[in-house]
Amino acid sequence: MSNDNEQSPELTLLGKSDVPFPASPDEATLESFDNPSPGRDYWIELDCPEFSSLCPVTGQPDTALISIRYVPDNLCLETKSLKFYLASFRNNAAFNEGIANRIADDIIAAVSPRALEMRAEFAARGGISLSVEISHP
């Protein structure tokens, strides 16, 4: 059985179990691979039901369901790097709105999708839940 990163040597996480999670989003890298069907529009859907970050005021944990849908152009997002990238927010203190927009901006910068829709549904804190929806372009 061949290892996918033999075909894509630029992928540094796939197939490796000894790589530590990055300490912050600034240290994380979103990796990509060539779109196998660049002539067709198709949606890729990714869900992270266990996203966590920290409230910048109280330091309490915030949790969210992050749902990402995108139509790839020339590149597809490699999912293990996305997992590591999203986990890097775990100890990051930021407001929910800023986190959601940062994630969308970083994905757009990494793979330049033809279209992107993202929803971040944060769990209720203080009796109010917050959701952020982003679309690109």
Image (tube, grey):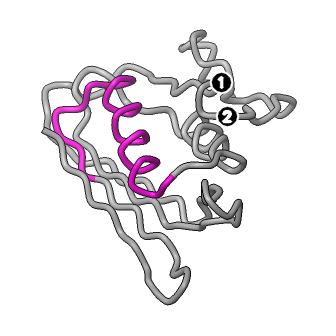
Vertical position of residue 90 compared to residue 66: above or below = above
Image quarter where the C terminus lies is: top left
Image quarter where the N terminus lies is: top right
- Residue at horizontal 57%, vertical 24%? 29
Q: Give the prevailing secondary structure in the magenta stretch.
A: helix
Vertical position of residue 53 compared to residue 107: above or below = below
Distance of label 1 from label 2 (alpha carbons): 5 Å
Q: Are marks 1 and 2 in contact (CB under 8 Å)?
A: yes
- Residue at horizontal 59%, vertical 26%? 26
Q: Secondary structure at mark 1?
A: helix
* Stretch of the chain drawn in magenta: 95-117
Q: Measured from the top left, where is residue 87 in percent x and y?
A: 66, 46
Q: Dot 1 corresponds to which residue?
A: 27
Q: Dot 2 corresponds to which residue?
A: 24
- Residue at horizontal 76%, vertical 36%? 21
Q: Which mark is residue 121?
A: none
Q: How many marks?
A: 2
Asked whether residue 39 is drawn in magenta, I would say no
Q: Front-most of 46 and 38? A: 46
For the residue marked with disc 1, what is the amino acid? Glu
Q: Secondary structure at mark 2?
A: loop
Circle 1 crowding by C-alpha within 10 Å: few under 14, some 14–19, many from 20: few
